[in-house]
Amino acid sequence: MTLLRARALSKLFEDNQVLSGVSFTLRKGQWLGILGESGSGKSTLLRILGRFADQDEGEVLYRNERLTPVRDQLIPGHKAIKLVHQEFELFPNQTVLENISYSLRFYDPTYRQERVEELMQLTRLHHVQDHKAKLLSGGEKQRTAIAKALAELPDVLLLDEPFAHLDNRNRQAMTEAISRLRKKEDMACIFVTHEASDALAWSDEVAVLREGKIIQIGTPLVVYDQPADAYVAELTGSVNWLGRTGSGSRRFIRPEKIKITRNQEKSKWEGVVETIRFRGSYWDYQCTNSKKERIAFYRQKADLAVGEKVLLTYSEQDVRLVD
């Protein structure tokens, strides 16, 4: 069932076209990741969907009903669509418990207590439940803001850069909280991010936004493995460009598809290792050949040295074409 639909949304700010013809649908329970660089229009799109800003053209429909323009609303926002801003918008001098309880202040006290406890467990905030919001870390503020938004369970949750500015420890806690959210709460979510790894990991579908336009939308695997153009290919991961076809299309292959061979006849690329970078779960090798062309490949072990000659091979089935 379609919950939310955007139809040809456009927005202009001081002669700057922030959004242009943005369209998509969001189903019940679906998670949609909006991937784009800074300035691509991601946050503006969320504000329009959350009914905090009006589009200049197009429409937003919730359950097939066109939503009232923000300018005609007494209070901005929508009860069934909750937006968690990057600034969190918590009450700084209230505790975590007080912030989460606020949306439930008119509910039965027993239900309020049970719901708040459920959200505290979901976001693992018990250890800071009596701390004022202004004293929390970035990750704790983020989780408190999400718990506050979920107090009255929305149909659609909007997250603005949920992993931005988090250190690795808080990022892990945030990842676990979102994972529990997906399993427990039956709601749809749209989150915007500039990190491809987050969009690919958490989305049922990924929409790539560039200069206010969606240039590709599809499952994470399709967007990564069959990018619509060179921009999407480079935005979603490392790329080795292999030249052009006779028709002018660009050929590329991902570093993880390249293997070392000892057989000269099977070799498709010969070069010298220039740099080696440890990435935690793998090593990233950068090589150049006699034409100063560069190629990258990954290995699970550090068994090569800078200056060492390597023969590389790959399957043509793993080569992709983009215009």
Image: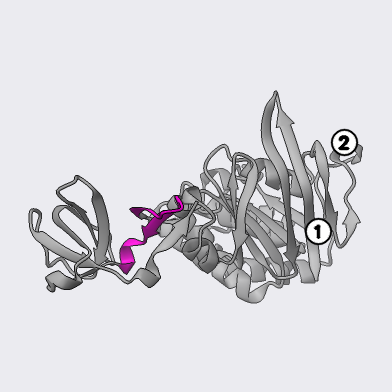
Query: Nearer the observer, disc 2 or disc 1?
Result: 2
Name the side, left or right, on which 214 lies relative to 12: left
Residue name at image x 32 percent, y 66 percent: 256
Magenta part of the chain: 241-257
Mark 1 residue element:
loop
User: Which residue carries the number 2 mark?
Assistant: 71
Kindly identify which numbered label has been placed on residue 149: none
Tell me if residue 256 is in the magenta stretch: yes
Q: Position of residue 74 (x, y in %)?
A: 90, 40
Given residues 290 and 240, the one toward you in this image is 290
Q: Position of residue 315 (x, y in %)?
A: 32, 72
Residue name at image x 74 percent, y 52 percent: 23
How is colour applied across the structure in the image? one colour
Given residues 243 and 257, the one toward you in this image is 243
Residue 142, relative to residue 313: is it above or below? Answer: above
Amino acid on which disc 1 is placed: Ala
N-terminal label among 2 and 1: 2
Tell me whether the residue at label 2 lies in contact with that at label 1, contact meaning CB atoms closer than 8 angstroms.
no
- Residue 13 appears in the rendering: yes
Amino acid on which disc 2 is placed: Arg
Residue name at image x 40 percent, y 55 percent: 245
Cα separation between marks 2 and 1? 18 Å
Quadrant of residue 179 within the rendered picture: bottom right
Q: What is the crowding at mark 2: few (fewer than 14 residues within 10 Å), some, or many (at least 20)? A: few
- Residue 131 appears in the rendering: no
User: Which residue carries the number 1 mark?
Assistant: 80
Q: Position of residue 165 (x, y in %)?
A: 46, 46
Position of the N terminus, as image quadrant, is bottom right
Residue 220, relative to residue 61: is it above or below? Answer: below
